Image (cartoon, rainbow, N blue to C red):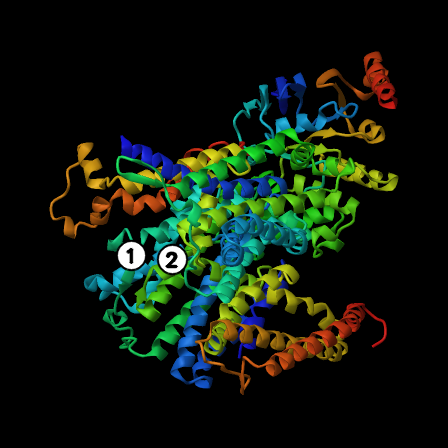
Amino acid sequence: MELILVNIIDGLVTGLLLFMLSAGLTLIFSMMGVLNFAHASFYMLGAYFAYQISIALGFWMGLLIAPLIVGVLGAGVERYGLRRVHQYGHVPELIFTFGLALLIEELVQFIWGKNQMPYNVPEVLNFTAFSIAGNSIPAFKIFMIFISIGIFIGLLYILTKTRVGMIIQAALSYPRTVEALGHNVPLIFMGVFGVGTALAGVAGVIAGPVLGTFPGMAFVLGSIVFVTIVIGGLGSLWGALVASLLIGWMTTFAKSYNIRMSDILNGIGISTPENLDDNIFRDFWTVTSPQIADILPYILMVLILIFRPAGLFGKRES
Amino acid sequence: MSTPALELTGLKKSFGKAEIIRGIDLSIGKSERHAIIGPNGAGKSTLFNLITARFPATEGTVKLHGEDLAGLQPFQINRKGLSRSFQITNIFPKMTVFENVRCALLWAQGYKYSFWNLVNKSRRLNEGADAILDQINLLPRRDLPAGMLSYAEQRALEIGITIAGGADVIMLDEPTAGMSHSETDYITDLILKVTEGKTLIMVEHDMGVVFGLADRISVLVYGEIIATNTPELVRADPKVQEAYLGAALEEEH
Amino acid sequence: MTDQITTDPSKPAQRMRAGSMSLTVGPWIVAAVALMLMPYIFTSNSALTIMNQMWITVVFALAYNMLLGQGGMLSFGHAVYAGVGGFACMHIMNNSDLFASFPLPVLPIFGGLFGMGLAMIVGAFSTRSAGTVFAMISLGVGELIAACSVIIVAFFGGEEGVSGDRTYAMPFFGNEFLQQIDVYYLTSFWVLLSAILMYLWSRTPVGRMANAVRDNPERAEFLGYSARWVRFYSFVASGFFAGVAGGLFAINYEILTEENLNTASSGVILLVTFLGGVGFFFGPIIGAIVFTLVQTVLSLQTELWAFYAGSLFLATVMFFPGGLAGLMMMHVPVFRLGKMKMLLLPYAKTLIPAAIGILGLCCLVEMTFHYRHAATGDHEMTLFWTTFDSHTLMPWIIAAAITAVGLGIAKMTAPALKEAWDEANTAGGTS
C-alpha cells in the first residue's frame, strides 16, 4: 500500500513534467498547426542555461532567467525561421523544426561537450520532505509538483480569465477575424511560441538536476512528449494533461513492480513451453515489466491509434 | 416512369444547434438538367456536400438510381457514377493540365490501384484525356501546370475533371462564379456540350445561366425547397418572388 | 564523377511526353555504363567501400522519397523498414541450409519482402491521414521497434546485433563474393534495378494518384480513389525498397545493430533526401552521393561535421526548399534561353567570396571549439595547413577579417547577381 503511494507521487512528478512540455506543444500546435519537433530541445536549453546561470548566481536566478532566455530564443525562432518556412506548407515546417532539434543538440555539444553537467538540486531543497514506509520523498520532488501545478493554474487563468487569453483563444479558431479586429496576429503567434518554449525551459530547469543535464536529454523526453500529445489527441489541452499523467503513472508502476510475462500468461491458463531456450518466442516469455516500461507509451499510442484514431480527447477528423 | 437519377428524402443537416438543411425532398429524373437557386446562405453548397458525403447527413436519405448512399465514402459514391465540381476551384495545381484530366480517367477506365500498367503506354487513356481536353478547349494548354492557368481556364478544367470519368450524374457547384460575361457564356456553352445526355445538377447564382440551361429549377431558401418547377413557372411563382425580394431587402439592412 | 549518374535520370522525369510510347532508355544505359566503369576509375578499396555505401543510400533515399516527395508523407521512422529487412537477411545468412540453396544476389529480395511485410502492418493504421499525424505515428512506431531491439534479442541480437557471413550462399556462377569488388557489382546491379523499378512505379496509375493525393486528397477522393489506400500502396512499396536497401546493407557489412533502426538513422535519410531535393525523381540520388562524400571527407577533417551538416540542412529547408535538384532545375530555363554565360561572372563574384567567408566562419567555429574543449595546455591547432596557437589573438583577428570581408563582398555583389538572374530568365532582350 505504501509503495503504491510512493509510486503515485513519482508518477505524478513525471506526468506533470511531461505535461509542462506537452502543454506548450499543444498550445503551439492548435494555434499554428505546427508540431514543434524542437520543443524538447528548448527544454534541454532551459536545463543548460540554468546550470550556467546557477554557477554564477545560484539556482533561483537560474529558475527565473533561464526560461526567459529560452522564451526569447523561441520567439526568435518563430519570427526568423518558422515564419519564413510557413509559406512552403506544414511538412517543410515540421522538417524545419526537426533540423532545428538536430542543430540544437549539436550546438549544446559544441558549447558544453558530451558529458553530463554537474547541475544539482540546490542545497535549500536537498532534504527529505517526508518518508513513507522507509521510502524517502525528497523535497525537490514536492517542489517540482508545486511549480508544475502553479504554472498550470496560471496558464488556465490567463487563457480563460484575461483579455489576452480571450484574444489568444479567438485567434486559435478565427485568426483572420481576430486580425481584422485590429489585433496583431503574427505577434500573438510569436508570443505564444515564446511562452510555449519558455514553459519547456522551466521544465528543463527543474528536471535538469533530477534527470541529468546531458546532450541526449532532449531526445529521451522528446519522443515521449510527441507520443503523449498523439495519445491525448492533437490540439487538446485536457488530452495532453490526461495522457501525461497516464504515461507518468504507467511507466512508474511498470518499473517498480516486476511483473513477468510468463506469470501473466500462466495466469490466464497458457503454460510455459518446454525448452524455452530454443523457442523463437523466448524473449516474449521472459519479458518483464521494468524492461518494457519505457516502450509502454509507444505501445499505448499504437493501440489508441488503432481503436481511437483521433486520440483520447481529439476531435474526429471532419 | 423509371427510377429517378437522384432522389432525396427528408434530408436534414445541423451544425451544432443551427439547422442548415431542414428536410429536403427532391427527385431528379434521368437526363434532366436541374438547377438549384436561392439567396446566399440558403444551404445550397451544404446540400451538395450532403449528397456527395463530404459531410454526413443528420437525417434523411440520398438515393442514386434507386440505391441508398448512406454510409458510403466520397470515393465510393464517385464509383457509382456521381461526380461533382467545387465552388472553390479544386484541381491538382502542380500537375499538368493533361495529367489532371488523365488522373480523373484512371478509375473510370478500370486501372484501380494497379502498378503493373504504365500510364504512358495506354493509348486509350491518353487519347481519352486528349479528347476531354479538346472538348473543354484546353488542348493548347495541355502541358502547362494547372496552377498557371487563368481563372476561367481553371474552372473549365474543373468541369473537365468532373466529367472525365464518364459519370452519368454531374453536379456542378457555381461553375460560373466570379467570371466575366464572355467567360460565363463560354462556360455555359461548355456545360451544355459536355453534359449532353447526362443528368446535371447545378448550383448557380447567374440567372442567365440558370434559365438558359435548366429544364427544372428548385428554389432553396433557409434550408427548404419552396418551389420546384420549369423556369417559366418558377419565375412567375409569387413565393419565389417574395423570398428573393425579402432576402434582398434583408441584405440591404 | 557524379554527373553522369545524377543528371541523366532527370530527363524522363521532367520531359515525359504522354503520347510517346517508349520509356527513355538512354539515361539508364549511361547510368549502367557509369556504374560499371567506376571501379576502374576509383580503384582503391576505400573508394569501393564509399561507393557501396553511396549506392545503398541511393536505394534507401529513393524509397524514402516515394513517401515524402511523391506521396507527401513525412516519416521520422523509416529506418526500421530498412533495418528489419536487413535483420531478416542476416538471419537467412545464418540459416546455412536455406542460405546455401540460392545465390547471394537474390538475398535483397527477402529484405524487401520483410520490409514490405512490416510496412503492411504499420501502414494499415498509419496511412489513414498524411501530414502531422502520420509523421508522429512514424516516429512512435520507429521508436517502438528500435526499443524492441534490446528486448527481442532472438531477432535483433540485443546490444551486439546480428552478424553473419555472406560467402556461405550458393556460388553465383562460381563467385562467392569474397572480394569488395564482387559486392560492388552486386550492389550496382541492385541500385540500378531498384531505381528503374521505382521510376516506373511513379508512371503507374497508383504512382500518379500518389501525386494527386499528395496535392489534393479531397479531389482525389471525388475521382474514385480512396486517399488512404493510395497512401497505403505507396507506403508498402516504399517499405519494400527500403528493405532491399537493408538487404544490401547486410550483404555489405555482414552485421546489423540497433543503429540501423534508430531515429538517428531515420533522420539521416530525411536529411539526405531533402538535401538532394524531394521535388524530382533524381533529387535523392544527388542527395545520397553528395551527403556520403561530404560525410566521408568532413568526418575525417573535423569533429564538428554533424554540426555543419545540421546547419546546411536547416539552411536548405529555409532558403532552398527544392534542394540541390531544385537548384539545378532552376537553371534549365536559363540554359534553354542560351543565357548561361551571362550568369557565370556574377556567380563567381558572389559565390567565391561567400565561400571564403563561410570558410572563415568555420575557422572561427573550429577555433572556439578548440579553445573550449582541447586538453588543457594543448594550445596548438592546425587549420588549412596552418598551425597556430588558438590562445593568441592574431589567428582570431585573421579569421574574423576573412569572414567579414568574404561575406561583405558577397553581400555587396548579391544585388548584381539577382539582376543578372532576372535578366537571364527573360526571353529575348540583350544577349
Tell me the quarter of the image containing the C terminus of chain B. Answer: top right
Residue A97 sits above or below residue A299 on the image: below
Of residues C237 and A297, which is closer to you in this image?
A: A297
x then y, percent, for residue C345: 75, 80
Measuring from the top left, give residue C362's x and y in whole percent.
Answer: 58, 74
Using the image as rendered, state which of residue C355 and residue A22 is in the foreground.
A22
| Residue behind mark 2 | C261
Q: Is residue C326 above or below residue C118?
A: below
Q: Chain of mark 2?
A: C
- Report crowding for label 1: few under 14, some 14 to 19, many 20 or more residues within 10 A (C-alpha): many
Chain letter of disc 1 in the image: C
Q: Is residue C76 left or right of residue C88?
A: right
Amino acid identity at mark 1: Phe
Q: Which residue occupies 26% across, 77% down? A: C174
Q: Residue at x 58, y 56 (%)?
A: A96
Q: In the rendered image, is residue B78 in sight?
A: no
> Which numbered marker is on residue B117?
none
Q: What is the residue that sits farthest to the front in this orientation?
A: A124
Residue topped by disc 1:
C156
Going by the numbered disc 2, the residue's amino acid type is: Leu
Q: Nearer the viewer, residue C422 or C17?
A: C422
Total count of labels: 2
Residue A288, how many percent across, how many down? Answer: 25, 44
Q: Is residue A286 left or right of residue A57?
A: left
Both marks 1 and 2 on one chain:
yes
Q: Earlier in the sequence, mark 1 or mark 2?
A: 1
Outermost residue toward the left in this view: A274
* Callout 2 crowding tier (Cα within 10 Å): few <14, some 14–19, many ≥20: many
Q: Secondary structure at mark 1?
A: helix
Q: Are marks 1 and 2 in contact (CB under 8 Å)?
A: yes
Q: CA distance from mark 1 to mark 2?
A: 10 Å
Residue A43 coordinates in the image, percent (x, y): 51, 50
